[in-house]
Structure formats: structure tokens, C-alpha cells
Image (cartoon, rainbow, N blue to C red):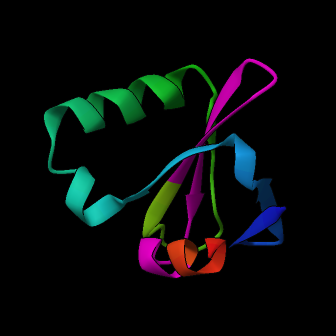
Amino acid sequence: MYLSIGNDMAVRDRSIIGIFDLDNTSTSKRTREFLDRAEKEGEVVPCDDLPKSFVLTSEYGFSRVRLTSLNSGTLEKRLK
């Protein structure tokens, strides 16, 4: 099954490691360091609008941080 995360993107539900709210998680130093490292390594997939959350995925041995303008609660509801 696939989860639509906006901007005409969808991810396989089995590849999702976590869905995180940017407002809550970006206050943590570790999360900011993680996102900075992911951006430097080219693992971040940007979105067109202001990002509200990010979806961490791992598929075929590659990790991706997919920014989305959708609320993390909305994405969670779509999974169910």
C-alpha cells in the first residue's frame, strides 16, 4: 500500500520509519543535526510549499527524508 504525502508523491507504507512534526522535533539539537547531515548527503527530498512535517523512509538500503506540507496527524490518519 502507498501513502500520498502531497506534491504528487507517494511512499510505500512498508518503507516508512517514522512521521515527524517539524515544529515539535526541530527544537531538539539531535534532530537539527540529523536533518543537516541528511541535507549535506543529499538524502532530503524537498517540497514546494512550507514544510510542516517529514517522513523518514528506508528502501533498498537508502534512507530518505521527505519533506511535506501536510500535517503529521493527517499523514497518520491516511495510514489507517
Q: Quadrant of residue 77?
A: bottom right
Residue 34 lies, in percent from the top left, at 36, 29
- Quadrant assignment for the C terminus: bottom right
- Quadrant assignment for the N terminus: bottom right
Residue plotted at (72% across, 22% down): 62
Q: Is residue 37 left or right of residue 1?
A: left
Residue plotted at (27% across, 37% down): 32
Residue 37 lies, in percent from the top left, at 43, 22
Residue 46 lies, in percent from the top left, at 63, 53
Q: Residue 36 versus residue 31: which sits nearer the camera?
A: 31
Q: Quadrant of residue 70?
A: bottom right
Q: Is residue 37 above or below residue 20?
A: above
- The overriding secondary structure of the stretch rendered in magenta is strand
Q: Is residue 67 left or right of residue 73?
A: right
Q: Is residue 72 above or below residue 30?
A: below
Please report the bounds of the magenta region as a residue range.
55-74
Residue plotted at (48% across, 67% down): 51
Q: Residue 60 versus residue 68: which sits nearer the camera?
A: 60
User: In the image, is residue 72 part of the stretch drawn in magenta?
Assistant: yes
